[in-house]
Amino acid sequence: MNNKQDTFVLYLGDQMAELPLLSWKRMFGGYGMYSEGYFFAIMFDDRLYFKTDSTTEAAFREHGMQAFRPRPDQRLRHYFEVPPDVVEDRDRLCQWARAAIDVARSRR
């Protein structure tokens, strides 16, 4: 790991270290993040996106966050950007991450 994106994923790994069996792998030109084998997040272009459903999406929208758009003609409507203030707050980040993991678990 040696570029800015790699540094960000390591930072996120540290921020969410309390999550069980946290791991990530390269995908989508970024990284996919997993907890206990559940794919719950995408890290792309120095932004973090969590898996959402109709219940959890509201919190992201209240913060003015948008769905993941890897390209202008593509949108993954079930992954929303995590607000920067949440990313910086370890406790809140882990709380939001657990909700995303629950969504991933329920869709399996």
Image (spheres, grey):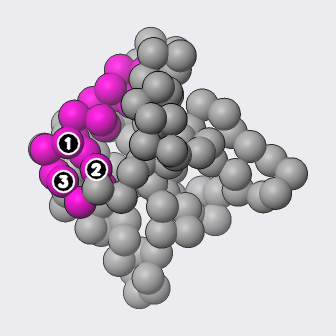
Tell me residue 43's x, y (percent). Answer: 48, 57
Residue type of the residue flagged with mark 3:
Asp
**Residue 72 visible in the snapshot:** yes
Q: Residue at x 70, y 51 (%)?
A: 69
On screen, residue 8 above or below 15:
below
Tell me residue 25's x, y (percent). Answer: 47, 56
Q: Compare marks 1 and 2 and give the one earlier in the sequence.
A: 2
On screen, residue 10 above or below 84:
below
Q: Looking at the image, which residue sits at the far bottom? A: 2
Mark on residue 92? 1
Q: Main secondary structure of the magenta part?
A: helix
Spatial CA distance of label 1 from label 2 is 6 Å
**Residue 50 visible in the snapshot:** no
Proximity of marks 1 and 3: CB atoms separated by less than 8 Å: yes
Q: Looking at the image, which residue sits at the far right? A: 73
Which portion, as a residue range, is magenta?
Answer: 86-103
Proximity of marks 2 and 3: CB atoms separated by less than 8 Å: yes
Q: Nearer the viewer, residue 77 or 102?
A: 77
Mark on residue 86? 2
Mark 2: few/some/many CA within 10 Å (<14, 14-19, 20+): some
Q: Nearer the viewer, residue 1 or 77?
A: 77
Proximity of marks 1 and 2: CB atoms separated by less than 8 Å: yes
Q: Residue at x 60, y 31 (%)?
A: 78
Residue type of the residue flagged with mark 2:
Val
Residue at disc 1, secondary structure: helix
Q: Residue at x 60, y 57 (%)?
A: 27
Residue type of the residue flagged with mark 1:
Arg
Q: Is residue 66 left or right of residue 89?
A: right
Residue at disc 3, secondary structure: loop
Q: Is residue 96 left or right of residue 48?
A: left
The residue where tag 3 is placed is: 89
